[in-house]
Amino acid sequence: MVVRFASYNTALSRTHSGGLLTAIQSGKDKQVLATVALLQEVRADILLLNEVDFDASGETARLLQGLLRKPSASNPGLDYPFSFCQPVNTGMPSGRDFDKDGVATNKGADALGFGDFPGQYGMLLLSRFPINHSASRTFQHFLWRDMPNARLPKHPSGDAWFDEGDLAVLPISSKSHWDIVVQVNGQDLHCLCSHPTPPVFDGAERRNFCRNQDEIRFWSDYLSKAPYFIDDQGRRGGFAFDDINSADFVLMGDLNASSYEGDSDRSAIHNLLTHPMMSAIDFPRSVGGIDHSPKGNKKYSAYHTAVWRMQADYVRPSYLLKTVGQAVFWPSLHDATYSLLKNTSDHRLVYLDVTTAR
């Protein structure tokens, strides 16, 4: 059986709490409708959406599911009866002055993850297949200081940037890290989902740079079964599987890092993408990425997943899964489907087709 996994930073987040829900309820928001049309074109079976504002009622997710079920003039409806959506750290009040400007604002850079209200820039996973919620794990609350050899930021003088009070509440995840167990024809597939903070928008201390690195390193340690992890459910240890031949997973998300471009510590993303548990397949490509960079960046432009010319978004399989297709959905300027990009995100959707039978 072929299963399509996709990751898409939708950039649907709004500037105030409830703004996205209101936009969806209106039925007229151009960005929302364009996003739905694009998703109906790609037709993933399991789909991670980044930058979908979390609301505790679940109404945002339900309305998006409803819009996707409605057929359009171009495509039939797309039914995702199962979803996974949990709170994230963005915009969550910390009570601390993380940016050291003398004022603890409880939002923006002083929140547990950068955001102006709780749930901004959240995550949502939609699936055609059942989700085992009891077996799934979240790491929203795992503290950064509890990662061995954490790369905590320092003042240029060498003194620690964060004090003990900061570190007592600061999680490693700017949003969250999720290990979601999806059951495909009786087989467990783990979706490892995250959206690390961009490694920029900080100061000489490079606190975002450091956090991005450790948010990415989190998955390398997790796949190596490091014992230090404690999930939000109280369970200890890294990636759990019965034996090496049952470790089926797909890494998904906007990681805000590239092994060969950008401002991140490239060693963290390189180590993750070349981890022994990860498939060594090439990266997905697009013609549209090449069209978008006709002059510089030609060497890597086919792999770009954002209009600001970098590979930031990933759908990468376990070495046990057989890949039968993959792409960045970025059509050529001359392709009829290029119009689907109008009014959508500055990121491009990435998808991967794998066979699940062994």
Image (cartoon, grey):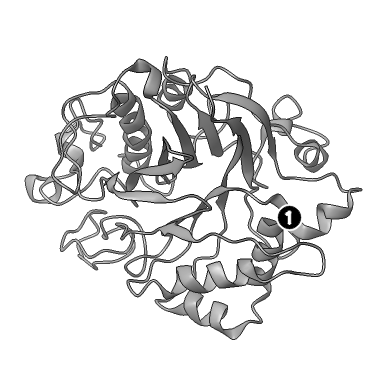
Q: Work out which residue is located at the far front of the displayed protein and give it.
A: 186
Q: Nearer the viewer, residue 235 or 345?
A: 235
Residue 252 placement, left or right of 160: right
Q: Nearer the viewer, residue 150 or 155?
A: 150
Estimate the x, y position of residue 84 in percent, counting from the top left. Answer: 39, 56
Estimate the x, y position of residue 333 in percent, counting from the top left. Answer: 87, 48
Mark 1 residue type:
Glu
Q: Which residue is mark 1?
A: 41
Q: Is residue 151 above or below residue 122?
A: above
Q: Nearer the viewer, residue 243 or 217?
A: 243
Q: Residue at x 58, y 48 (%)?
A: 45
Estimate the x, y position of residue 260 in percent, counting from the top left. Answer: 57, 24
| Callout 1: SS | helix
Q: Quadrant of residue 227?
A: top left
Q: Work out which residue is located at the far bottom of the displayed protein and give it.
A: 26
Q: Is residue 307 above or below residue 146?
A: below
Q: Residue at x 46, y 58 (%)?
A: 82
Q: Quadrant of residue 326?
A: top right
- Tell me if residue 160 can be seen: no
Residue 308 placement, left or right of 219: right
Estimate the x, y position of residue 351 in percent, counting from the top left. Answer: 63, 40
Residue 192 placement, left or right of 285: left
Q: Quadrant of residue 182?
A: top left
Q: Residue at x 23, y 38 (%)?
A: 155
